[in-house]
Image (spheres, helix red, strand yellow):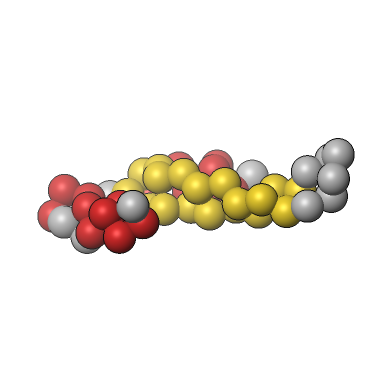
Amino acid sequence: MAKKVVASLQKKEGKNFAKVIKTVKSPKTGAYTFKEEIVTLDQVKDALK
């Protein structure tokens, strides 16, 4: 599935999007998980907050 997302982001209409991956720590277990989002280039800084 990741290959499909990356391939679609490389197309002409996908140039205005970025895939953002954040690490989130669980308050219960203390384990880290990864959260993935596809956002426009204008919203990258807001997505990382």
Q: Residue furthest top?
A: 28
The percent position of residue 19, horizontal first and vertical second, equals 41, 53
Q: Nearer the viewer, residue 17 or 36?
A: 36
The percent position of residue 5, horizontal first and vertical second, equals 30, 52
At x 86% / y 39%, what residue is drawn? 28
At x 84% / y 40%, what residue is drawn? 27
Position of residue 47 in the picture relative to residue 12 (left or right): right
Position of residue 8 in the picture relative to residue 17 (left or right): left
The percent position of residue 1, horizontal first and vertical second, equals 33, 52
Would you say residue 6 is visible in this rendering?
A: no
The percent position of residue 40, horizontal first and vertical second, equals 36, 44
Would you say residue 21 is visible in this rendering?
A: yes
At x 78% / y 52%, what residue is drawn? 31
Q: Residue furthest left?
A: 12
In this rendering, the count of numbered labels is 0
Q: Quadrant of residue 29?
A: top right
Position of residue 48 in the picture relative to residue 27 (left or right): left
Picture quarter with the C terminus: top right
Position of residue 4 in the picture relative to residue 34 (left or right): left
